Image (cartoon, helix red, strand yellow):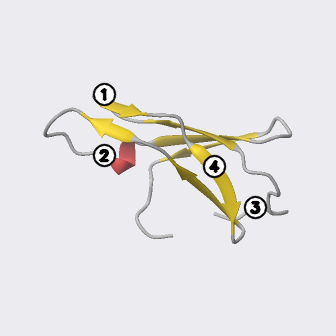
Amino acid sequence: LSFEPAPTEAPLVVAEGQKGLWLGPLESRIEGGEIIASGEARADPGQWIDRAALRLTLLGQDGGALVLDGCGGDS
């Protein structure tokens, strides 16, 4: 996914997932023209994280927003 023009400030990134998954606050940054978000995730014992059930909401400094459903493997 690319943006035109490329963002100069990292957006606030909010993550949601399936029941039984806890996602902590994410830290985001711009690195090499890409938005990188990282944080802690915990799932109930024995539960896998369903990447297709993830929803990422990016909130820009200008008030714009983008919602991404599912998380692909390779970028």
Left or right for 68, reference 59 = left
Q: Which residue is under mark 1?
A: 19
**Which structural element holds mark 2?**
loop
**Which structural element holds mark 3?**
loop
The residue sitting at 45% across, 49% down in the picture is 70
The residue sitting at 77% across, 42% down in the picture is 60
Amino acid type indicated by mark 2: Asp
Q: Which residue is under mark 4?
A: 28
Q: Quadrant of residue 7?
A: bottom right
Q: For the residues marked 3 and 2, what is the alpha-carbon distance in whole angstroms? A: 26 Å
Is tag 2's residue or tag 1's residue first in the polypeptide sequence? 1
Amino acid type indicated by mark 1: Lys
Residue 17 screen position, x and y as percent: 40, 36
Viewport quadrant of the N terminus: bottom right
Is tag 2's residue or tag 4's residue first in the polypeptide sequence? 4
Residue 50 screen position, x and y as percent: 31, 46
**Which structural element holds mark 1?**
loop
Q: Quadrant of residue 32?
A: bottom right
Q: Which residue is under mark 3?
A: 3
Q: Residues within 10 Å of mark 1 (few under 14, many from 20)?
A: few
Is tag 3's residue or tag 1's residue first in the polypeptide sequence? 3
Tag on residue 50? Answer: 2
Q: For the residues marked 4 and 1, what is the alpha-carbon distance in whole angstroms? A: 24 Å
